[in-house]
Each structure stands twice: as C-alpha cells, then as structure tokens.
Image: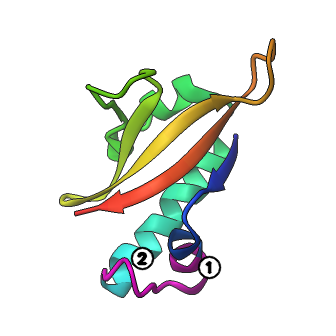
Amino acid sequence: MEWEIKDPELQKLYTDGKSKKYNIDSGAAKKFAFRIQQIDAVKDIEDLHRIPSLEFKKVRNKKNGRFFTICVEKNICFLVEIKKESAGSNKSIIVITELFQ
C-alpha cells in the first residue's frame, strides 16, 4: 500500500533511526521502521485490521473520521490519516502524521 511521512523529523526517524523531535530508543525506532514495512506490504486498509500486533484503531473526535493509530510498542503509537489517491479512485494512501508516547 502506498504511504508517505508528513513530518520531516519522522522521515529522519524512519531513515536514520533517530530524531531530535522524537526521542525514542533504537529498538523502538527499528520497530517503527518495521511497522512502515508492514504498511508497505499490505494491499488495502482491511489488511491492516488483520495484523493484530499493529493495534490498528480508529481515532475518535477527528473531523473527517479518517484518522487511525498504529502501535509501535505498548506506549508508543503513531497517527495516520487515510486519504484517497484521487477523486473517484478506490486506492488510498496512508499519511503518517505524528508519533506520540
């Protein structure tokens, strides 16, 4: 599935395994990169629900209802937004927006 990282510091965490903004240990950084690999491997949103370790859950109180969390570890998750690739398209893109602890 297609994905993109919105925050440059999250991109740095993904590529370099560390970030000034997101102070997590190297093990959690590796798991973050692995979670993105899992996203890359799935074909659609429904596949994310089938991977229990992701703890893929819809976030309440978001305006358009297309926000979800994916857990890296017990207390570390990241927020994703599901966007349509283009108007009229059935393909979606996962936009990784932030990491929180």
In the image, 91: left or right of 19?
right
Taken as a whole, is the magenta stretch helix, strand or loop? loop
* Above-or-below relation of 61 to 95: above
Residue at the spot 38% in from the left edge and 80% down from the top edge: 21
* Residue 16 part of the magenta-drawn span: yes
Residue at the spot 50% in from the left edge and 84% down from the top edge: 17
* Above-or-below relation of 99 to 3: below
* Badge 1: residue crowd in 10 Å (few <14, some 14–19, many ≥20): few
* Closer to the camera in the image, 51 or 28: 28
Furthest toward the top, the residue is 88
Q: Position of residue 95 (x, y in %)?
A: 59, 46
Give residue 100's quadrant in the image. Answer: bottom left
- Quadrant containing the C terminus is bottom left
Residue at the spot 51% in from the left edge and 38% down from the top edge: 81
Bounds of the magenta segment: 12-24
Which element is circle 1 on? helix
Which element is circle 2 on? helix
**Kind of residue at disc 2:** Ala
Colour scheme in the image? rainbow
Furthest toward the front, the residue is 63
Report how far apart the C-alphas of labels 2 and 1 lie in the structure.
Answer: 10 Å
In the image, 29: left or right of 6?
left
**Kind of residue at disc 1:** Thr
Name the residue beneath numbered marker 1: 15
* Badge 2: residue crowd in 10 Å (few <14, some 14–19, many ≥20): many
Q: Position of residue 60 (x, y in %)?
A: 26, 26
Mark identifier at residue 29: 2
* Closer to the camera in the image, 8 or 26: 8
Residue at the spot 57% in from the left edge and 79% down from the top edge: 12
Furthest toward the left, the residue is 75
